[in-house]
Amino acid sequence: MNFQTAIKSGFKNYANFNGRSSRSAYWFWQLFVLIAANLSSAIFSTIGALFSIAMIIPSIAVGWRRMHDTNRGGWWSIIPIVGFIFALQQSDPDMNEYGPPAPPAF
């Protein structure tokens, strides 16, 4: 998944905690939030704070789906170090209880 597709997917699934999110979709989303929050804070700190608040739910949702992609419960994403380590792991290539794997990216 490329950067633009990952951002569209993040907004499309704003509060979707079901299904799976690939490793690239998760990390591209995290990169987008980091860059956008810093740019908006540079313009005006209140805008940056509002943007960060608005991105809490979709960031948790993407992390939740990322845990599903590694065949783990989504609640692992709220434990900081453990969630980070699990987010680094490869996706489960097979169908799991959370759904089918993401289609291959070209």
Image (cartoon, rainbow, N blue to C red):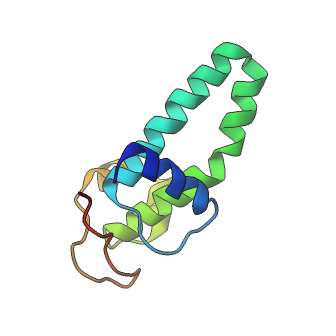
In this rendering, position of residue 3 left or right of residue 101: right
Where in the figure is residue 105, as x and y percent of width and height?
26, 59
- Return the x and y of residue 93 as percentages of the image width and height: 21, 73
Residue with the most extreme front position? 106
Q: Residue at x 64, y 47 (%)?
A: 56
Say if 73 sits above or below 46 in the image. Answer: below
Look at the image and tell me in which quarter the C terminus lies.
Answer: bottom left
Residue at 32%, 73% in the rendered image: 71
Between residues 66 and 31, which one lies in front from this camera angle? 31
Q: Position of residue 69 (x, y in %)?
A: 35, 68
Q: Relative to residue 88, is residue 32 depicted above or below?
A: above
70 left or right of 13 in image: left
Q: Is residue 76 visible?
A: yes
Q: Residue furthest right?
A: 46
The answer to which quarter of the image holds residue 51 is top right
Q: Quadrant of the N terminus?
A: bottom left
Q: Is residue 83 visible?
A: no
- The residue that appears at 51% across and 28% down in the rendered structure is 35
Please state the horizontal and vertical placement of residue 87, each as a whole percent of the image.
34, 53
Residue 54 lies left or right of residue 68; in this view the side is right
**Residue depicted at 40% across the width and 70% down the height:** 68
The mark tally for this picture is 0
* Residue 71, above or below 96: above
Tell which of 73 and 104 is nearer to you. Answer: 104
